[in-house]
Image: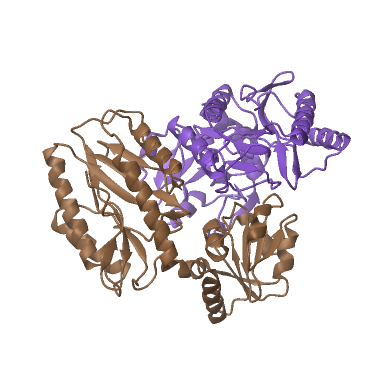
Chain colours: A purple, B brown
Amino acid sequence: MQLRNRLKLIKKTMQTHHLDALFITQREDIFYYTGWKANDGNILIINHQKPALFVSPLEQDAEKIRHVNLIYLKRKEDILKELKGLKLVGYDEYNLTANKFSLLHKLPIRLKKASELIKKPREIKDSWEIEQIRKAVSVSKKSFEKQKVYGKTEEDIANNLEASFRLQGALTAFDTIVSSGSGIIHHQPRKIIVKKGKPVIIDFGARFNWYCCDVTRTLVSENKEWKKTKENVSDIQKQIIDEITPGIEMSDIRKQYEKLMGKYGYKIQHSFGHGIGLDVHEQITGKLKEGMVITVEPGVYKNNGGCRIEDTILVRKKGVEILTKQIKLD
Amino acid sequence: MQLRNRLKLIKKTMQTHHLDALFITQREDIFYYTGWKANDGNILIINHQKPALFVSPLEQDAEKIRHVNLIYLKRKEDILKELKGLKLVGYDEYNLTANKFSLLHKLPIRLKKASELIKKPREIKDSWEIEQIRKAVSVSKKSFEKQKVYGKTEEDIANNLEASFRLQGALTAFDTIVSSGSGIIHHQPRKIIVKKGKPVIIDFGARFNWYCCDVTRTLVSENKEWKKTKENVSDIQKQIIDEITPGIEMSDIRKQYEKLMGKYGYKIQHSFGHGIGLDVHEQITGKLKEGMVITVEPGVYKNNGGCRIEDTILVRKKGVEILTKQIKLD
């Protein structure tokens, strides 16, 4: 992990925006900037000196973390001490509690929404990060390919997949979706047995060293209607992916997705994909660059089921690499 | 689940505090009041009519939820519509993002911290809730008792336990702690092999239907020093538990814990325990009552290791039932 580089980069951004400090409260951001697998309630303050990392007095493991002033958080006033005398402080508006936000208002400092700035460096993955995502893919692949589907309940399939992630030392990137014969997009697995004849969406992803991958496969067995739909969705996905290369923007991909879905006569029911990394849904701003990782997941849903195909994709110098390509389609 | 009763109870509290609505943003609270296993970003507004449940347009599963007005959240302004004309609205200060907090400030309403009020009904568990905790205990017991410890790494033990929870249809209540020969209280599992001769703390708990249990066992093999410590910690725990009965307060138990630890010559390094339920650490206010569930977890830590014994305990009409009693001590 290139922690020093990351800190250098974010400090430069702070200078550009005249920020004296960033008040960082998302566990994933704290991990990104310090290497500490943060717990709820931990805080990282990046200022122009050595960053301050606040942890609970029970979390003495954090003493191994270098390049920070480690502070055991006992009274919330200790946080204010660290910010005293500063003028402009950026905070993560999506990951700061109202309670801590009110606390910050006790100081005569100006506060600025800074979620986008804080997460900006995370958009481009370095080689170590890509390696972690590859491991998440490898765990996901092994778990999926040994999984029996027909004859099991939706719930059992989700449980088995996630148990398999854990046995391989990984976590679960998001609640696994197993949806048989249902047109609900974020379907919660039920205790019903999955049978041939209906399409079965399985949307899953392991999280290795906190790095996520996200894959969806749809099994259609011998159902003619859904076999055809799957061919179309697969064609649409391929054509979208073919367009992806450094220099284009997420909004360009969206336009291409809308055009293709229209051409095949399908209505749009969700976005085409998203950035991914330490979060399963992660910010991407501006033009795509080498080292960014996104998903592409066109989907078609009707009353009797749905079909979605999703892959996790790395933007290369030219074009892309489909990281999840080896996970078989059926 | 007694959803109607819960709503009735909270509406009565709202009347007492002149609250026109509660703005509920913790997933566990939404589940508690509606039965909907909420996702991040969901919102429940309880007013004096039918509660409003906001979910993503992708979460059509929520249509099965009764007794609510289901609203698909498309623009954040839709939230404001629901609050228009109200005077005093309570919010959960620990589970509301700064971003949504700022949004609420756009309306001419008074806002009041209400986390304690919102969670108050959760303190006493009904019979269905206790049943879920019992199931979490049963899953935890099976997973722990089949687990080989010596010769495995700390990480492998944690992974195996959590995979076993998942295979039994449960989740993980909190990151499992496996700590061999370390005096760190919230220790993160390492890739080192656990060997006899050092004390090994295993702090674990499954989560069934979102209800948690929390257990710690310490294996001391034939280490004389730690065998003695374990006897003492076990004695201390028993004496604390003997004092617990309806009518006493958490602060009374704390005093008893401090007295006992002092008597045995140990210093206090963390609190004696906590409320538990939908959250692994849950609020308990005022006097203990029948149906409350807490943990008791005295612990002693030195440079060469630690010993903690923790059980999940149900307060009965008189005295307690130790729900995790059947999980063997070594």
The answer to whether residue A140 is left or right of residue A293 is left
One can see residue B228 in this view: yes
Q: Relative to the observer, which residue lies in front, B316 or A150?
A: A150
Question: Residue B56: horizontal and vertical position, in percent?
Answer: 68, 52
The answer to whether residue A131 is left or right of residue B266 is right
Which quarter of the picture shows residue B7?
Answer: bottom right
One can see residue A106 in this view: no
Residue lying farthest to the right in this orientation: A263
Q: Is residue B159 above or below residue A183?
A: above
The answer to whether residue B146 is left or right of residue B125 is left
Question: Residue A193: horizontal and vertical position, in percent?
Answer: 57, 43
Q: How many numbered marks does the figure carry?
A: 0
Residue lying farthest to the top in this orientation: A318
Q: Relative to the observer, which residue lies in front, A108 or A264?
A: A264
Q: Which quadrant, please, contains the C terminus of chain B?
A: top left
Question: Residue B157: horizontal and vertical position, in percent?
Answer: 34, 35
Question: Residue A328: horizontal and vertical position, in percent?
Answer: 63, 24
Q: Is residue A266 above or below residue A191?
A: above
Q: Relative to the observer, which residue lies in front, A185 or B259?
A: A185
